[in-house]
Image (cartoon, grey):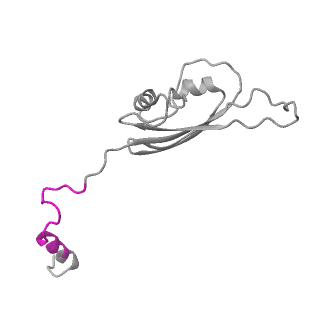
Amino acid sequence: MNPHTPAALLAALLLTAPMIGGSASDAGPVLPAPTTALRLTVTGPAPATTALSPDAAAVSAPAARSVTLHCDPAAGDHPRADVACADLDASQGRVDRDSDTACILLYDPVEVRAEGFWHGRSVSFARQYGNTCELNARTGAIFAF
Protein backbone atom coordinates (compact mmCIF):
# COMPACT_ATOMS: atom_id res chain seq x y z
CA MET A 1 0.00 0.00 0.00
CA ASN A 2 1.25 3.46 -0.89
CA PRO A 3 2.15 5.35 2.35
CA HIS A 4 0.63 8.54 0.92
CA THR A 5 -2.92 7.18 0.32
CA PRO A 6 -5.72 8.57 2.51
CA ALA A 7 -6.24 5.19 4.22
CA ALA A 8 -2.55 4.87 5.09
CA LEU A 9 -2.43 8.44 6.43
CA LEU A 10 -5.52 7.89 8.54
CA ALA A 11 -4.10 4.66 9.98
CA ALA A 12 -0.84 6.41 10.85
CA LEU A 13 -2.69 9.25 12.56
CA LEU A 14 -4.81 6.86 14.61
CA LEU A 15 -1.78 4.85 15.73
CA THR A 16 0.19 7.92 16.81
CA ALA A 17 -2.65 10.02 18.26
CA PRO A 18 -2.72 10.34 22.04
CA MET A 19 -5.57 8.66 23.87
CA ILE A 20 -8.22 11.05 25.14
CA GLY A 21 -9.91 10.13 28.41
CA GLY A 22 -8.69 6.55 28.64
CA SER A 23 -6.01 3.99 27.93
CA ALA A 24 -5.33 1.74 24.98
CA SER A 25 -7.03 -1.10 26.85
CA ASP A 26 -10.42 0.71 26.90
CA ALA A 27 -12.95 -1.15 24.77
CA GLY A 28 -15.05 1.93 24.13
CA PRO A 29 -18.00 3.58 25.80
CA VAL A 30 -19.81 1.67 28.50
CA LEU A 31 -23.34 0.95 27.30
CA PRO A 32 -26.24 0.50 29.71
CA ALA A 33 -27.51 -3.02 30.27
CA PRO A 34 -30.38 -4.02 27.97
CA THR A 35 -33.61 -2.82 29.52
CA THR A 36 -37.19 -3.96 29.66
CA ALA A 37 -39.67 -1.11 29.61
CA LEU A 38 -43.16 -1.62 28.19
CA ARG A 39 -46.31 0.46 27.97
CA LEU A 40 -49.24 -1.96 28.23
CA THR A 41 -52.81 -1.01 27.26
CA VAL A 42 -56.06 -2.98 27.59
CA THR A 43 -59.32 -1.80 26.02
CA GLY A 44 -62.47 -3.74 26.88
CA PRO A 45 -64.33 -5.82 27.43
CA ALA A 46 -67.31 -4.02 25.94
CA PRO A 47 -70.25 -2.98 28.14
CA ALA A 48 -72.53 -5.88 29.06
CA THR A 49 -75.29 -4.60 26.78
CA THR A 50 -75.49 -2.72 23.52
CA ALA A 51 -79.00 -1.42 24.25
CA LEU A 52 -79.59 2.25 24.77
CA SER A 53 -79.55 3.51 28.31
CA PRO A 54 -82.87 4.60 29.93
CA ASP A 55 -82.30 8.19 28.84
CA ALA A 56 -81.83 6.98 25.21
CA ALA A 57 -78.10 7.71 25.22
CA ALA A 58 -75.81 5.17 23.64
CA VAL A 59 -73.64 3.15 26.02
CA SER A 60 -70.11 4.52 25.92
CA ALA A 61 -67.23 2.51 24.55
CA PRO A 62 -65.04 0.73 27.09
CA ALA A 63 -62.22 2.81 28.48
CA ALA A 64 -58.60 1.95 27.89
CA ARG A 65 -56.38 1.19 30.88
CA SER A 66 -52.60 1.55 30.66
CA VAL A 67 -49.66 0.75 32.90
CA THR A 68 -45.90 0.71 32.59
CA LEU A 69 -43.83 -2.38 33.23
CA HIS A 70 -40.11 -2.37 33.92
CA CYS A 71 -38.08 -5.50 34.60
CA ASP A 72 -34.64 -6.23 36.08
CA PRO A 73 -35.77 -5.25 38.69
CA ALA A 74 -39.54 -5.45 38.40
CA ALA A 75 -41.08 -2.00 38.71
CA GLY A 76 -43.56 0.42 37.17
CA ASP A 77 -47.23 0.78 38.01
CA HIS A 78 -48.17 -2.75 36.91
CA PRO A 79 -49.79 -4.35 40.01
CA ARG A 80 -48.17 -7.76 39.33
CA ALA A 81 -44.87 -6.56 37.82
CA ASP A 82 -42.78 -9.42 39.23
CA VAL A 83 -45.09 -12.11 37.77
CA ALA A 84 -45.47 -10.26 34.43
CA CYS A 85 -41.67 -9.97 34.10
CA ALA A 86 -41.30 -13.68 34.90
CA ASP A 87 -43.90 -14.51 32.21
CA LEU A 88 -42.00 -12.43 29.63
CA ASP A 89 -38.68 -14.04 30.57
CA ALA A 90 -40.18 -17.55 30.42
CA SER A 91 -41.49 -16.90 26.90
CA GLN A 92 -38.28 -15.12 25.80
CA GLY A 93 -40.13 -11.84 25.30
CA ARG A 94 -43.15 -13.18 23.42
CA VAL A 95 -46.32 -11.52 24.64
CA ASP A 96 -48.69 -14.10 23.13
CA ARG A 97 -48.10 -17.84 23.43
CA ASP A 98 -49.93 -21.13 22.99
CA SER A 99 -52.27 -22.28 25.74
CA ASP A 100 -54.24 -25.44 26.52
CA THR A 101 -56.75 -23.53 28.63
CA ALA A 102 -60.36 -24.01 27.55
CA CYS A 103 -62.37 -20.79 27.62
CA ILE A 104 -66.10 -20.30 27.30
CA LEU A 105 -67.24 -19.36 23.80
CA LEU A 106 -68.52 -15.93 24.76
CA TYR A 107 -67.58 -13.10 22.44
CA ASP A 108 -66.70 -10.12 24.60
CA PRO A 109 -63.67 -8.66 22.80
CA VAL A 110 -60.62 -7.25 24.53
CA GLU A 111 -57.94 -5.30 22.66
CA VAL A 112 -54.39 -5.11 23.97
CA ARG A 113 -51.21 -3.34 22.99
CA ALA A 114 -47.61 -3.60 24.22
CA GLU A 115 -44.99 -1.07 23.07
CA GLY A 116 -41.41 -0.67 24.24
CA PHE A 117 -38.40 -2.90 24.80
CA TRP A 118 -37.73 -6.36 26.25
CA HIS A 119 -34.03 -6.84 27.15
CA GLY A 120 -33.20 -4.08 24.68
CA ARG A 121 -35.17 -5.65 21.82
CA SER A 122 -38.02 -3.59 20.36
CA VAL A 123 -41.56 -4.83 21.10
CA SER A 124 -44.65 -3.73 19.20
CA PHE A 125 -47.64 -5.99 19.81
CA ALA A 126 -51.35 -5.44 19.24
CA ARG A 127 -54.12 -8.02 19.21
CA GLN A 128 -57.79 -8.55 19.89
CA TYR A 129 -58.89 -11.55 21.97
CA GLY A 130 -62.41 -12.97 22.06
CA ASN A 131 -62.73 -12.47 25.83
CA THR A 132 -60.69 -11.96 28.99
CA CYS A 133 -60.32 -15.72 29.57
CA GLU A 134 -58.58 -16.08 26.21
CA LEU A 135 -56.46 -12.99 26.93
CA ASN A 136 -55.30 -14.31 30.31
CA ALA A 137 -54.66 -17.82 28.98
CA ARG A 138 -52.49 -16.55 26.13
CA THR A 139 -50.64 -13.70 27.86
CA GLY A 140 -50.36 -14.76 31.51
CA ALA A 141 -49.95 -11.86 33.94
CA ILE A 142 -48.70 -9.40 31.32
CA PHE A 143 -52.11 -7.74 30.87
CA ALA A 144 -53.48 -8.66 34.33
CA PHE A 145 -54.21 -5.17 35.62
Foreground residue among 82 and 6: 82
- Tell me which residue sits at (36%, 35%) in the image: 73
| Left or right, residue 130 beside residue 119 | right
Q: From which residue to which does the magenta span run?
A: 10-29
Does residue 31 sit above or below 68 in this rendering? below
Q: Main secondary structure of the magenta part?
A: loop
The quadrant the C terminus occupies is: top right
The quadrant the N terminus occupies is: bottom left
| Left or right, residue 51 beside residue 91 | right
- Tell me which residue sits at (54%, 19%) in the image: 100
Question: Is residue 131 inside the magenta stretch?
Answer: no
* Residue 52 screen position, x and y as percent: 85, 32
When asked about the image quadrant of residue 57, the answer is top right
* Residue 143 screen position, x and y as percent: 54, 31
- Tell me which residue sits at (17%, 75%) in the image: 8
* Residue 64 screen position, x and y as percent: 63, 38
